[in-house]
Amino acid sequence: MTRTRKPVGRIAFVGAGPGDPGLLTRRAHDALVDADQVVYDRGVPETLLDAVRAEAREDAQFTPAEGAPGDVAKVLISAARSGLNAVHLVAGDPFGHDSVVKEVQAVARTAAHFEVVPGVGQAEGVATYAGVPLPGVRTAADVEDVSVLDFDALAAAVGRGSLALAIDAGDLAAVRDGLLAAGVDGGTGVGVTGDGTGETQYTTTSTVDSFVAAALGFTGRVVLTVGAGVGERDKLSWWENRPLYGWKVLVPRTKEQAGAMSARLRAYGAIPCEVPTIAVEPPRTPAQMERAVKGLVDGRYAWVIFTSVNAVRAVWEKFAEHGLDARHFGGVKIACIGEATADAVRAFGIQPELVPAGEQSSEGLLAEFSPHDEILDPVGRVLLPRADIATETLAAGLTERGWEVDDVTAYRTVRAAPPPAEIRDAIKSGGFDAVLFTSSSTVRNLVGIAGKPHARTVVAVIGPKTAETATEFGLRVDVQPQHASVPDLVEALAAYAVELREKLAAMPAKQRRGSKVQGPTALRFR
């Protein structure tokens, strides 16, 4: 009789770093993606947990760590003995926590396979994000119990270089008293950073004498930096000085469409809020699309012109229904109205022949689209799969150039359901610093389902047609890029924020207080 060998699971103690999901190491990422069970410390930020859950296995279990180190170790060992891969996810570096060291010791006494994946230490990582270098001889530690600190050693470290400590905000006064008692000069520079590496990271600078009062209102874990490096913060601060840092930006698009825009906004420091204004549904009658797909396969078309990612998706879904793939586009040339649409085509293994180099709009595409030539173009028909509410500009322009156009409804756009009440209230009361509109329909539908953005909200539009619609609805257009694309729209908003900051910085203090300019940029100068 052959016995089936029971699968053996693994245990990983994984350092999450200081909080920014982008600081997870590749090894940490791989361990989390492969985990069946993730036990996480309560000090791990929710934003990081959300990012991990988004890439984890669908059936992975996430539970908070409960009890003493021995209790947590038992949970991990039990999972491994059941053939599961278990991870204990901790803030900072695993060996920066005495409790985790005890867990590793407990696991090491068993036959379980385990590994310890280092993470960026919270103290050092946040100091770097706050723009505070730690030159010379430096001391950095993630402290769980300040009563065990050797303040004489810390004072010596400050005298020779710099110091960074990750501690609870409630322990700030004890650390101040300990440093002063150990002989640290009360005028030595101090930085206190809350929500380190997070969307709302904030640093206040003062001195050893005054940092407790300066940090009033800080809660949870903070990072304290002491020494000469604090004076460099004005020049080296980068995380909090990104152009859109702290701006709450409304993105009226579905999650699928908003991904690239939100990622760019986050890179500039903004906090995007995605609110779908449009829902995409199949056409009421599928006959048109059925004929169009048959025509593509039969060689009826010389060109297919895609004006949106939704149009690309609609055509490929029809292809999939009929068991077709990219090979059936052989001989048909593809044009795309912009780079985002072109990327959607490339994702299916096809390189578009034409994407406007200039304005990415119907007009921009027409400017580069060749007139029909009966000799060069024996097939003179173009397929234009679009939304049911699309304008006639492109079809009319192609007809003028001698092409026969099959203008086919590939999908319908309908107004999405209203967002939650708190988002509607924020839109109307000025709770968002900016809103980005990428089409006329996003303007109409946002106003229809949530109301008109407040006058203090910066309005950014992707192109002239969208600007016209925004103006018709009584909105003041503040930002419009030269080229109609999502990357250029975000770049233009970032440049506008920089201009605001420079204008406010040049104002006398009295004028700043009376300025009508709103948002985080203005608040930093008040």
Image: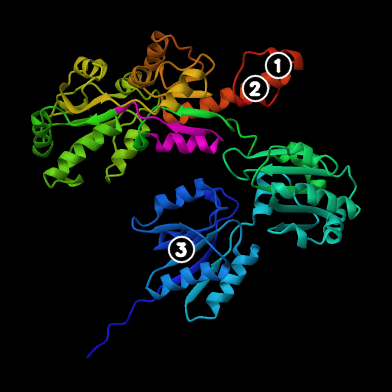
Rendered image quadrant of residue 108: bottom right
Say what secondary structure mark 2 lies in.
Answer: helix
The answer to which of 360 and 374 lies nearer the viewer is 360
- Please identify the quadrant where the N terminus is shown: bottom left
Q: Which residues are magenta?
A: 258-278
- Please provide percent x and percent y for residue 525: 70, 24
Question: First in sequence: mark 3 or mark 1?
Answer: 3
Q: Amino acid at mark 1?
A: Arg
Report which quarter residue 358 is drawn in. Answer: top left
Find residue 460 and report its horizontal and vertical position in percent: 47, 21
Instruction: Tell me the residue that label 3 is attached to.
Output: 31
The residue carrying mark 2 is 522
Choose between 25 and 147: the one closer to the eye.
147
Numbered badge on residue 512: 1
418 to 57, vertically: above or below = above
> Which tag, 3 or 2, sits closer to the chain's start?
3
Between 39 and 57, the residue placed more toward the observer is 39
Quarter of the figure that contains the C terminus: top right
